[in-house]
Image: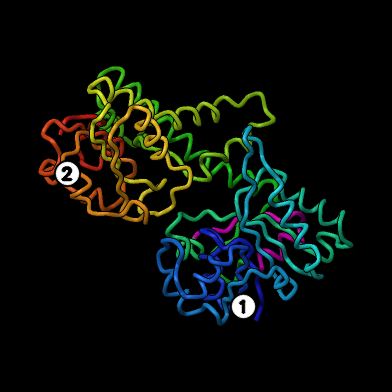
Amino acid sequence: MKTVSVIGIGRVGLPLCLSLAEAGFKVYGIDKRQDYIQTIKNKEMPFEEDKAKELLEKHVNSNFIPSIELNKVKESDYVILTIGTPVDEHLNPEFKQIDSLTRNLLPYLKKNQVIILRSTVSPGTTEYLKDLIEKETEFKIGKNLFLAFCPERIAQGKAIEETKELPQIVGGIDKESTKKATEFFKKFTVEQVESDARSAELAKIFTNMYRYINFSIANEFMILAEEHEREIYDILHLINHNYKRGGVKQPGYAAGPCLYKDGFFLINTMPFNELISVSWKINETTPLYLIKKIKAKTALKNKKVVLLGMSFKADNDDTRNSLSFKIKKALEKEHAELKFHDPLVEKFKGNLDEVLKNAEIVIIGINHSEYRNLSLDYIRKLVKKDCLICDIWNVFKQNKIIYTV
């Protein structure tokens, strides 16, 4: 049985551990958070993830062993790093975290191991790690130690099924590293697409940025439609209905730990960065623009405002970089009376009827299924009769962004 150490078992690493255990590997899931590790050992999932609970109960403490001990790496044939490179306060790539981890790993590396970077990183990070390892050890990458960047491209909440189903990009630092990493992924993924490390790093970021830029185009079109006193959803229908070159996306809040920062990995050294930087500016300011439009219709001071959805994406409990918190801060500045609800985020769970009772403004922060299943008639029975709805996601199917209930 081949052994794998997965370092950093958060929302990327833990589902991967479970997928590997199900595929027949012995897996060490390593994380420095003792209480977090204990939660997993107790067979409790620390976040929402489809099909993960049953795999955790099946494999934990047998062929999946959660641990805080980095020395488990020396027992492993494969070492997978699921930490990325964040950005600093100036939005430049920050290497301290991955540099520190790699240096701590060095005493436990052994000949012929395959090291795989899994999370989104700044282009050139895999080469940086190669140089660091060769500088600090006797290993030669591609000869007696192998290194590749193999990004995850899963949707949070769907990691278990998508790990198996999606083509896996394999970007070795050299041809032998690509070969070794491909052999590994053949054991549990349906298809492998081979390349080099830098191309794979760019492919991951380009994938994220393509989605992010599409959001910004949709949001800018929404703003332009509002300025022309027209509804974007009516116009999207005109564009997309039975038109084979349609496909313009609907507006929404584009956020999360990846989409927020990944573009800055590409533009921090380049003068021609307008498309990505403007997309960031549009997406980050869209919530504030809509609050401005609400203020043009009614004062916010002392109004009961209900914000529905605090996570950064639908049907997920992850609040990192959620734009709902930007809305929250802006409303606090206006001295509104705020109430929050999210069916998946523990802090914001509660009785929805009570939260909505006598609301004067309702803002849809994220389009959870629970909200999409609500009717406007249900809302009308609870809120004040002149309550304003701000629904960028069109969950109530009114084809309007801001309207009176």
User: In the image, residue 112 lies at what x, y percent?
Assistant: 79, 70
Q: Residue at x 61, y 66 (%)?
A: 185
Q: Which mark is residue 26?
A: 1
Q: CA distance from mark 1 to mark 2?
A: 52 Å
Drawn side of residue 280 relative to residue 127, left or right? left
Quarter of the figure with residue 386:
top left
Drawn side of residue 268 relative to residue 176, left or right? left
Q: Is residue 176 magenta?
A: yes
Q: Is residue 50 above or below residue 380?
A: below
Q: Residue at x 44, y 52 (%)?
A: 318
Query: How many numbered marks does the figure carry?
Result: 2
Q: Which residues are magenta?
A: 166-184
User: In the image, residue 76 lies at what x, y percent?
Assistant: 71, 73
Position of the C terminus by quadrant? top left
Q: Secondary structure at mark 2?
A: loop
Q: Is residue 371 above or below residue 358?
A: below
Is residue 189 in view from this perspective? no
Is residue 342 in view from this perspective? yes
Quarter of the figure with residue 21:
bottom right
Q: Which mark is residue 357?
A: 2
Q: Is residue 18 above or below residue 397?
A: below
Quarter of the figure with residue 301:
top left
